[in-house]
Image: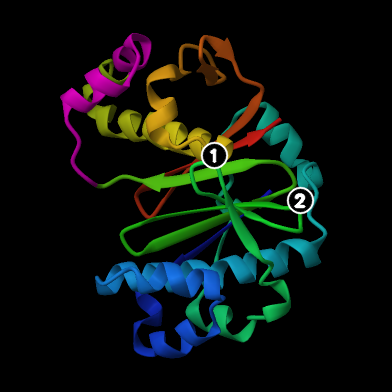
Amino acid sequence: MKIYLAKADTIADYSDMAYAKLTNYRKKKTDKLHVELARLTSITAGLLLNYATKDYLNAGSDETAAGLGAISQANTAFLESSITEISSDELFDAYDPAYDFEIEELGQGKPVFKERTDLYFNISHTANIVVVVMAGKPIGIDIDGNRNFSDRMIDKFYSKKEAQWVYGNELRKSDRFFNIWTMKEAFSKMRGDGIARTILNLEFLHDTDQVECIFNGEKQDVLIEEQEYYGYKIAVIREA
């Protein structure tokens, strides 16, 4: 498993050239967007996925490399080095159309590689930051934070135990809210069901050293990773 990150606003001066490199799939998604930052984010996502696919496959990544399996099983936070930040120059220089594998959408729009059933990816973005995660098993990622939320959201979308944990530390209330929110998003993206179909039946319990994921009343066999980057929360959930 490996995480890649890029800033969308860094390609603003040559967005037309960046757009020209995109697959038809990504161009169609970009063409639907009319706000400049949203377009830049979509373009960056397309280039970053190409970079991540190439790098991941050429590195011969494996789920137990460098002790990552032990890290995941302990449900500890990512090391800073686990996130690879890619500059706009690197996105351009390393671009290789041979790694633009055809994408199809399943279920609620979950994108997957049509032919490479051995390779999984997921994309998330917030503000001007885009993240891509690659793995050998179904996986989901979410980045969020630095925005307003209300107690009403906690009371409506969080279980009683989740709400108690969030309200239990007023100084870290925002951190705790986004810890859980990003996990919920990442889990729903891993499954491909969409957040609306999962959120009310999904909870993440923080009573012990290891976070437990409960869905439809059953504990899930998943690996949970969390990190903070540029002040944003990042959660990754992968099938065990």
Q: Is residue 157 magenta?
A: yes
Dot 2 corresponds to which residue?
Answer: 117
CA gap between label 2 and label 1 equals: 15 Å
Dot 1 corresponds to which residue?
Answer: 192
Position of 145 relative to 6 (above/below): above
Kindly indicate the quadrant of the structure image that contains residue 77: top right
Label 2: which secondary element: loop
How far from the left and from the top, in percent, is residue 116?
Answer: 76, 57
Three-letter amino acid code of the residue under disc 1: Gly
Position of 98 relative to 56 (above/below): below
How far from the left and from the top, in percent, is residue 209?
Answer: 55, 17
Residue occupying the point 37% across, 74% down: 31
Residue occupying the point 47% across, 84% down: 18
- Relative horizontal placement of residue 138, taking residue 159 as reference (left or right): right
Q: Is residue 153 magenta?
A: yes
Can you say which quadrant of the picture contains the C terminus? top right
Position of 70 relative to 114 (above/below): above
Three-letter amino acid code of the residue under disc 2: Thr
Observer-nearest of 60 and 107? 107
Q: Which residues are magenta?
A: 147-165
Residue occupying the point 53% across, 69% down: 25
- Relative horizontal placement of residue 96, taking residue 231 as reference (left or right): right
- Of pointers 2 and 1, the one earlier in the residue sequence: 2
Position of 47 relative to 67 (above/below): below
Say few, some or many: other residues with alpha carbon within 10 Å of mark 2 (under 14 / 14 to 19 / 20 or more): few
How far from the left and from the top, in percent, is residue 200?
Answer: 37, 20
